[in-house]
Image (spheres, helix red, strand yellow):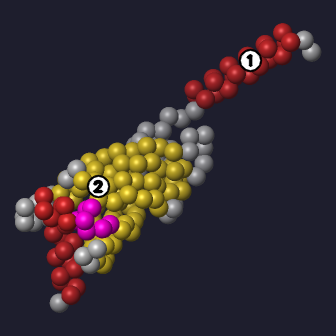
Amino acid sequence: MSWVRVRVLLLALLVAVAGCASFGPKLQSPQLSLVAIQILSGDMFAQRFKVRVKVENPNDLEVAVSGIEYKIFLMGDSFAEGASDQGFVLPAKGEAEFDMTVNTNFVSSLGRLVSRMGGGKLENVEYEIAGTLRLQKGLMRTIPFSHSGTVNFVKQLEKLEGKAK
């Protein structure tokens, strides 16, 4: 086979692969929001929280997620970051909820949050959650996401106080 034929064949193969990729589905970033934050345990040095996350899928396709890497900010300060290997399936144009356990330390997170609130109640606390979803299959193996909103700690603290009585 001559070099000209090999080059033409390689060029044709590259064009075909590029053409196929352009016809594949374009996945939009899902919207992740914090539903609740519950204090599981804590002392002066470290706290464990259960964070309930809602994921909305804007795509026409079901998305199988194998895990998530995330960073959570409260009032602009870093609160928690990490990864979860808990898989779940997002239905097409649907939503799913899951829990993550996060660990923080007082100095870098909750202490700063309480001081920034100026002794006020922890209601309508601004948050941002950002990171990537790892997908179980497909050519595209990660989808980035970023979302901000508010979350209410008071409801969670009232639930804990009610259980303690």
Q: Does 59 sit above or below residue 162?
A: above
What residue type is disc 2 on?
A: Ser
Foreground label between 1 and 2: 2
Residue at (18% x, 70% y) in the render? 155
> Which x, y percent locates residue 108?
27, 61
Relative image position of residue 104 (x, y in whole percent): 32, 66
Q: Residue furthest top?
A: 4
Look at 22% across and 85% down and name the residue there: 163
Q: Which residue is mark 1?
A: 12
Q: Position of residue 23 (x, y in %)?
A: 58, 28
Judge whether residue 33 can be spotted in this image: no
Q: CA distance from mark 1 to mark 2?
A: 49 Å
- On whether residue 29 falls in the magenta region, the answer is no
Residue 149 numbered mark, or none: none
Q: Mark 2 highlights which residue?
A: 78
The answer to whether residue 100 is left or right of residue 142 is: left
The one nearer the camera, 10 or 22, is 10
Q: Is residue 140 above or below residue 1?
A: below
Point out the stretch of residues depicted in magenta: 104-110
